[in-house]
Amino acid sequence: MDCIFCKIAAGEIPSKKVYEDDLVLAFHDIQPAAPTHILVIPKAHLSGCGDITSENSAVVAHIFEVIAKITAELGLADYRVVTNKGESAGQSVFHLHFHILGGKTLKGMC
Ligand code: DGP
């Protein structure tokens, strides 16, 4: 499968890694929209949040634990977590990912 985030998860494409374990990887977004802009992805491919089922949803809970850990370690008290689903919602990479955005006052939702 030609998926850029699968390649990043496999180490085939370099990334500025923030956190990694067996299930997930967190790395800096290449086009930061805020002073802190980190992406957290499951290593196993899901195309987006529409693929989450009772069989695979444990990784999403784990991702939110990782988000809490990363942000605490960074001393980032206030932040936004975003996942885009579908092109018209702004999804450009079709591998589930959660944006962590912070380090400035975040305005509006869309
Ligand atoms: P979205 O538009 O919600 O699908 O977010 C995709 C994000 O992925 C976007 O903010 C840019 C980022 N991105 C795309 N390609 C790469 C890459 O090769 N490396 C890194 N670090 N980020 C990437």
Image: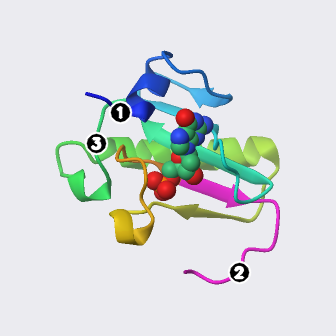
> For residue 10, which quarter of the picture?
top left
The question of residue 108 being in magenta is answered with: yes
Q: Is residue 87 left or right of residue 80?
A: left
User: Which quarter of the figure is the N terminus placed in?
Assistant: top left
Inter-mark Cα distance, 2 to 1: 31 Å
> Mark 3: few, some, or many residues within 10 Å (few <14, many ≥20)?
some
Q: Where does the image place residue 101, in percent across and percent down from the top left?
A: 67, 59
For the point 43% across and 24% down, which residue is it? 7
Give the amino acid at mark 2.
Answer: Lys
**Residue at the spot of label 2:** 107
Give the amino acid at mark 1.
Answer: Cys
For the point 62% across and 49% down, which residue is it? 68
Label 3 sits on a secondary structure element that is loop
Inter-mark Cα distance, 2 to 3: 29 Å
Q: Where does the image place residue 6, in percent across and percent down from the top left?
A: 39, 28
Q: Are marks 1 and 3 in contact (CB under 8 Å)?
A: no
Q: Is residue 93 left or right of residue 47?
A: right
Rendered view: 88 above or below 74? below
The tag earlier along the polypeptide, 2 or 1, is: 1
> Mark 1: few, some, or many residues within 10 Å (few <14, many ≥20)?
few
Q: Nearest to the eye among marks 2 and 1: give it.
A: 1
Rendered view: 40 above or below 78? above
Give the amino acid at mark 3.
Answer: Leu
The tag earlier along the polypeptide, 1 or 3, is: 1
Q: Where does the image place residue 32, in percent across and percent down from the top left?
A: 70, 51
Write down the region rendered in magenta: 99-110
The tag earlier along the polypeptide, 2 or 3, is: 3
Inter-mark Cα distance, 1 to 3: 10 Å
> For residue 76, which quarter of the picture?
bottom right
Instruction: Say if disc 2 is inside 8 Å of ligand 1.
Output: no
**Residue at the spot of label 1:** 3
